[in-house]
Image: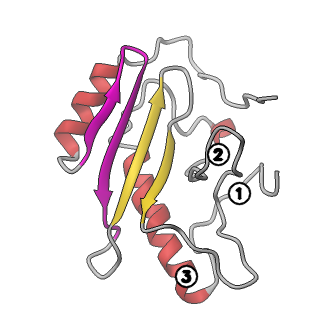
Amino acid sequence: MVIKFWKNPSNKKPRPIQWQIDEMKRCFLSFTVISKSTHFVIWQGILQPDPSMNSYTIKLEYKRGDCPKVFVINPKLEDLPKKSIPHLYSKNALNKDRNLCLYFPANNEFTQQDSIAHTIVPWTSHWLFCYEIWRLTGAWVGGGKHPLKGK
């Protein structure tokens, strides 16, 4: 059973997929479209949260009317001994990889009118920065809350 806990908070229609593609192309040249239709798009690209940190290959999936999903493809994310990576959604039967928890959907921090390039990609870079600090210290410095932890 799938529980949808996110709804478009406004009555405005979602931005067209092509608008999101154009915004990404304008803002992030390292991201390329690997699949698209009029209702969904998948990008792949590289983010490096800080020059002193690792570069990460990211896959970003977006379907109109749904929350964007972000996956780290390479290098693989690693737990610490006796500590699981915080702010990841649990695996399910359809996804072999866990997508990043970048924001709390119930707070409407991302809406279908927002630019993925101006929200989701910077939030992903911040998440990766926090992940690298967590790998060094064992403490998550990114704040936030995760409503589905352990599910």
Number of marks present in the image shown: 3
**Badge 2 local density, few (<14 within 10 Å), some, or many (20+)?**
some
Q: Amino acid at mark 1?
A: Lys
Q: Nearer the viewer, residue 108 or 41?
A: 41
Disc marking residue 65: none
Q: Are marks 1 and 2 in contact (CB under 8 Å)?
A: yes
Residue 59 location in percent, x, y? 41, 47
Q: Residue at x 72, y 28 (%)?
A: 4
Measured Cα–Cα span from mark 2 to mark 3: 23 Å
Residue position for label 1: 145
In the image: residue 25, left or right of residue 76: left
Residue position for label 3: 135
Disc marking residue 104: 2
- Whether 132 is drawn above or below 2: the answer is below
Measured Cα–Cα span from mark 1 to mark 3: 19 Å
Specify the principal SS of the magenta part.
strand
Q: Are marks 2 and 3 in contact (CB under 8 Å)?
A: no
Nearest to N terminus: mark 2 or mark 3:
2
Q: Amino acid at mark 3?
A: Arg
Q: Nearer the viewer, residue 33 or 7?
A: 33
